[in-house]
Amino acid sequence: MDNTDRSWMYRRLENGFLSSEFCVGVETFVSFALSHPECLLDGKLRCPCNRKKCRNKCFEEAETVKFHLGRYGFVPNYYCWQFHGDQYVPPMFPNFNMEAPSSSTCFVNRSTQQEFIDPIQSDQYFCNTEHGNTYFDDTNQNETNEFAEENPHTDSGNDDPQSPNSPVKSLYEMIKSAEKEIWDGNPHGHSLLSVLARLLKMKQEHNMSERNYNDMCQLMSELCPSDNSVPESFYATKKLIKDLGLPVEKIDVCQNNCMIYWGEDDSLTECKICQHPRYRRSRRRSTNRKTQTPYKKMYYFPITQRLQRLYASTATASHMRWHKEHHFDGETMTHPSDSPAWRHFDAMHPSFASEIRNVRLGMSTDGFQPFGQSGQQYSSWPVIVTPYNLPPWMCMKEEYMFLTVIVPGPHNPKDKLDVFLQPLIAELQSLWCSGVQTYDMHSKQNFNLRVALLWTISDFPAYAMLSGWSTAGKQACPHCMSDSNAFTLPCSGKTSWFDNHRKFLPEDHPLRRNRVMFIRGRRVLDPAPIVKQGDELLNELEEYGFRPSYEVDSETINKEIASYVQCGWRRRSILWELPYWSTNLIRHNLDVMHVEKNVFDNVFNTERPTSFIRLA
């Protein structure tokens, strides 16, 4: 068969039966895939059929792949077999991007797939199709990348300046037009963009109504010369701001936090778990979704466009390389890029590390009461991500902490936090597997931007919500897990972890044999527990059968499993859906404030003499 003509892939049926040409082609495809072991996982290959659960996401046996291809056909526009070791790009299809491909990666422009795929749903390998490119996933730990070893700081295969891609070009044009003076010769030099920013800030700070805002805009327009460009209303302001390309998604939520009406569940009118209605009752009984009021809704702010802005601006584009270009003396850690966890991630995913402009994120969440302690009891949970590519004096600034999810109250979401993280995880999967075409203002180059989440940062109760491990009871310690020596106090019935720390001392330490200063008559000879790796934890969760909290009947099933196996797991965290999460050396961190205040202060105040205690 001529390997340059793969049109047979989409001529599956002939007179209602599988065509002989298609069957021969499938055999050729499977043989080709099996000849590239770097793309296999335990002898299995990615299934490229058009079945929703496959589509190059899951690994199957060769015979199963043949059966799926015969039943469902190939996924649309998969002429380049990049997930199966193919470096060939057929010249007969004009939609392929032939501009300077990397020697180790096959990029395919898939702008024609918009009619097939929804870019916001959790389809890892077919998203961001408007400007995105498919990309070989490097989750295989045995992957080797000679190109990355020879050129660890390479930006792209072509150093010639390139023009910005169409989204960035339209952004530049919009900003340029908005920076024109509000009228020629105004004494303060105000532009349309600066006026809009000031007006929106005033509306937010003074809690202005839309009617008040519209009246103020009309008054400003009457006071200015006739050729002014002051917006006429709040609606006109929103239309201008929308062109900045920083959208916000309002997603309806079940009143009991069971599910969000998003993705495949967007058209439902009642909760699929508790059957609670989605909308409030109205007298008009309208079926128009725009006029109906949901019981609860969340806000999601996509991060892709904001990360692209960091490279589109000259103020930040050059700083996004700092994590790789700064000097590390080998002793003092001044940035997360100096940590062993960062270097371990680079070693596990060399193709991701070979592009220094790929972004690494940290995620943090905590609850707060917007109405204060004396007002209405309402707990809201914002989720914030921070890019660690920036130097430490920038990445910890407020303007570089991206608010992504606002979890509505009034109650603590607890184990239901994963329900609200679904859009964020789907976007992170897309940015890892496919990436997004981005323009680097510093090098004047277009490149494929990929993103990885390194870890989370939270306090101890929020750690349980993010990880799925319970922080209450005798197995609360996520380090000791089932090897904890906690005990119950006889009088109060509370759990105590006193004298659990001596096992972490060196084996010949004298305090291990001390029978007086700790629990009387007790020596500690047991070694410190071994910390389990991510793969071991994931296998343990799969063996027990824990489910994510957003699945139907997951709450009942998880409770039964937890009571039966007597372990600290309560559910399977949604973070395990990230293909690289199990390879992270550190997945969760406790924030510094709680470590300093709750641990150090209590130990120090207990140990120091009472004569030094300051009286209030």
Image (cartoon, rainbow, N blue to C red):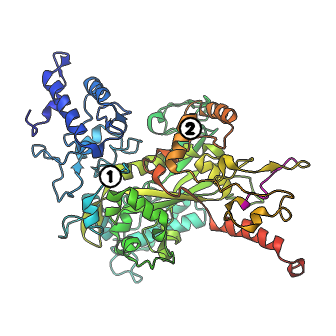
CB within 8 Å, label 1 to label 2: no
- Which residue does the image show at 36% across and 71% down from the upper left? 321
On screen, residue 88 above or below 151 = above
Q: Where is residue 329 in the image (x, y as percent from the top left)?
A: 45, 79
Instruction: Give the secondary structure at mark 1.
Output: loop
Which element type, helix, strand or loop, lies under badge 2? loop
Q: Does the magenta stretch include residue 495?
A: yes
User: Visible in this render: residue 233?
Assistant: yes
Q: Identify the residue at the far front of this view.
A: 508
Q: What residue is shown with label 2? A: 259
The quadrant holding residue 511 is bottom right
Q: Quadrant of residue 445?
A: bottom left
Q: Is residue 585 left or right of residue 231?
A: right
Question: In this rendering, which labeled residue sits more in front, label 1 or label 2?
Answer: 1
Quadrant into which the C terminus falls: bottom right
Q: Nearer the viewer, residue 547 or 477?
A: 477
Q: Which amino acid does label 1 sit on?
A: Glu
Q: What residue type is labelled 2?
A: Met
Q: In the rendered structure, does residue 129 fall within the stretch colored magenta?
A: no
Residue for point 36% across, 58% down? 243
Dominant secondary structure of the residues highlighted in magenta in the image = loop
Give how far across and how far down residue 614 sits, in percent: 86, 80
- Magenta-highlighted residues: 493-502
Q: Can residue 372 be seen in this view?
A: no
In this view, the residue farthest toward the left is 2
